[in-house]
């Protein structure tokens, strides 16, 4: 078991760390750089993105022929963690959800023509994208194979889409969409994935759903489809492959969330540690108190446990495995670590942590969604229980080299 990273990955990590320190943390500290939804202003983002591109730190996760640097999942884990030392980080490097997952699935599943039409504008930073899968009750939520209500009926060389989606991240700012809809009643091959443009008639955004926030660019929206027509050539893979597309996208996307969340968790510890060393109360430095030592020591350990889970899952994905149980374990643990890290850091900082003088309250509000998005904790625990039921003691088996 070799836990060393390659010199190439370390070079990217170090350059990202320097960029974050030099460019992003100062931008993040200036409240004038935030938009109305508490994310980086678009004009500021454009400037920062241009600088990241100029330094060769753009779309590291994609293949060179697509416009990236060809990092594998292990390399991504190292770099994404470093990117999200800043709350602005991922979007500046074009590694933020939902574009990140959409680009990777389009790279993997799109035809050459689809990659040129739908993928390249996202890679180049010209447009944003969204993945429209989740539906309000009684439609499907975390389980796309459930009762999906939105339908796409074939009519000659096009599909007619009717239905409703909600909590679609980034929809208000997106130009390109991947839509998952029901095309038949087949339990395994009943879903299909279709590509459509924002300017296609027959659909609308009903509302940008107010959330605890802060929000990604484009918010979380409810969409209504009323006989929208999508050309059959916009099918991603084949009719009936919608579930396959969601599996291709959601597994890696869940793990990239975890990679980024580890960076935010470490930032919380950094802020808390700095303050604990600077702050005196009742004649004693906070960092000298046993209670503070226990809080920070436990957090450091839990973050490292999360890193090991993420790395194991990333390695499995690089070997060609779906890594379902590894991704589920990482998702549960890291989501909870992020929430705990923000909460602990606020507690140590006191009123300062609750204020907007630090990004801790931003991270705290953001962290609460981590235990819900891409499958709630309970869903992933059920996945693990189901896997345990099938594998038994082999749930914990070691893979043997050469076999």
Image: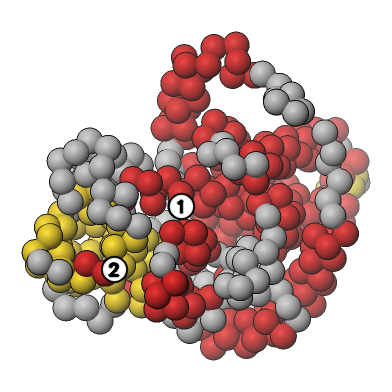
Q: Position of residue 179 (x, y in %)?
A: 29, 60
Q: Secondary structure at mark 2?
A: helix
Q: Is residue 65 left or right of residue 185?
A: right
Q: Residues within 10 Å of mark 1 (few under 14, many from 20)?
A: many
Q: Position of residue 139 (x, y in %)?
A: 20, 44
Residue drawn at point x = 51 percent, y = 52 percent? 253
User: In this view of the protein, which residue sits in the foreground, 65 or 197?
Assistant: 65
Q: Is residue 92 visible?
A: no
Q: Which mark is residue 113?
A: none
| Quadrant of the frame with the N terminus | top right
Give the residue furthest to the top.
393
| Label 1–label 2 contact, CB within 8 A | no
Can you identify the residue that label 2 sits on? Answer: 234
Vertical relation: 240 (above or below) 172: above
Q: CA distance from mark 1 to mark 2?
A: 17 Å
Q: Is residue 299 left or right of residue 375?
A: right
User: In this view of the protein, which residue sits in the foreground, 16 or 107?
Assistant: 107
Q: Position of residue 354 (x, y in %)?
A: 60, 56
Q: Is residue 63 visible?
A: yes
Give the residue furthest to the front.
402
**Quadrant in the picture for residue 306:** top right
Q: Which mark is residue 249?
A: 1
Q: Position of residue 194 (x, y in %)?
A: 28, 62
Task: Choose the circle earlier in sequence order: 1 or 2.
Answer: 2
């Amino acid at each position: 078991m070799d836990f060393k990273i390659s010199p190439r990955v370390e070079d990217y990590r170090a350059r990202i760390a320097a960029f974050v320190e030099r460019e992003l943390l100062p931008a993040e500290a200036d409240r004038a750089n935030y938009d109305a939804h508490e994310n980086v202003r678009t004009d500021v983002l454009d400037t920062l993105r241009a600088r990241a591109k100029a330094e060769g730190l753009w779309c590291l996760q994609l293949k060179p022929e697509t416009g990236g640097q060809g990092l594998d999942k292990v390399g991504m884990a190292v770099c994404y963690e470093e990117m999200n030392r800043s709350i602005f980080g991922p979007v500046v490097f074009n590694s933020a959800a939902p574009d990140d997952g959409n680009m990777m699935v389009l790279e993997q599943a799109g035809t050459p023509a689809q990659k040129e039409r739908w993928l390249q504008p996202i890679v180049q930073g010209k447009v944003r994208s969204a993945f429209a899968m989740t539906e309000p009750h009684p439609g499907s939520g975390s389980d796309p194979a459930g009762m999906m209500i939105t339908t796409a009926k074939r009519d000659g060389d096009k599909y007619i889409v009717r239905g409703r989606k909600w909590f679609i991240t980034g929809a208000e700012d997106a130009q390109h969409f991947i839509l998952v809809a029901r095309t038949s009643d087949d339990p395994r091959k009943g879903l299909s994935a279709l590509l459509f443009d924002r300017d296609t008639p027959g659909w609308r955004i009903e509302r940008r759903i107010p959330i605890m926030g802060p929000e990604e660019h484009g918010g979380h929206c409810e969409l209504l489809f009323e006989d929208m027509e999508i050309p059959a050539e916009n099918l991603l893979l084949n009719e009936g492959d919608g579930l396959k597309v969601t599996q291709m996208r959601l597994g890696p996307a869940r793990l990239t969330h975890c990679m980024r969340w580890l960076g935010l968790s470490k930032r919380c510890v950094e802020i808390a540690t700095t303050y604990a060393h600077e702050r005196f109360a009742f004649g004693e430095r906070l960092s000298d108190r046993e209670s503070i030592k226990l809080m920070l020591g436990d957090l450091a350990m839990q973050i490292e446990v999360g890193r090991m889970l993420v790395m194991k899952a990333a390695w499995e994905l690089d070997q060609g495995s779906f890594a379902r149980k590894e991704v589920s374990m990482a998702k549960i643990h890291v989501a909870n670590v992020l929430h705990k890290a923000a909460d602990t850091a606020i507690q140590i900082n006191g009123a300062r942590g609750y204020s907007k003088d630090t990004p801790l309250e931003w991270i705290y509000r953001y962290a609460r969604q981590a235990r819900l998005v891409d499958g709630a904790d309970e869903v992933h625990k059920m996945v693990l229980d189901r896997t345990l039921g099938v594998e038994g003691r082999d749930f914990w088996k070691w893979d043997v080299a050469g076999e």
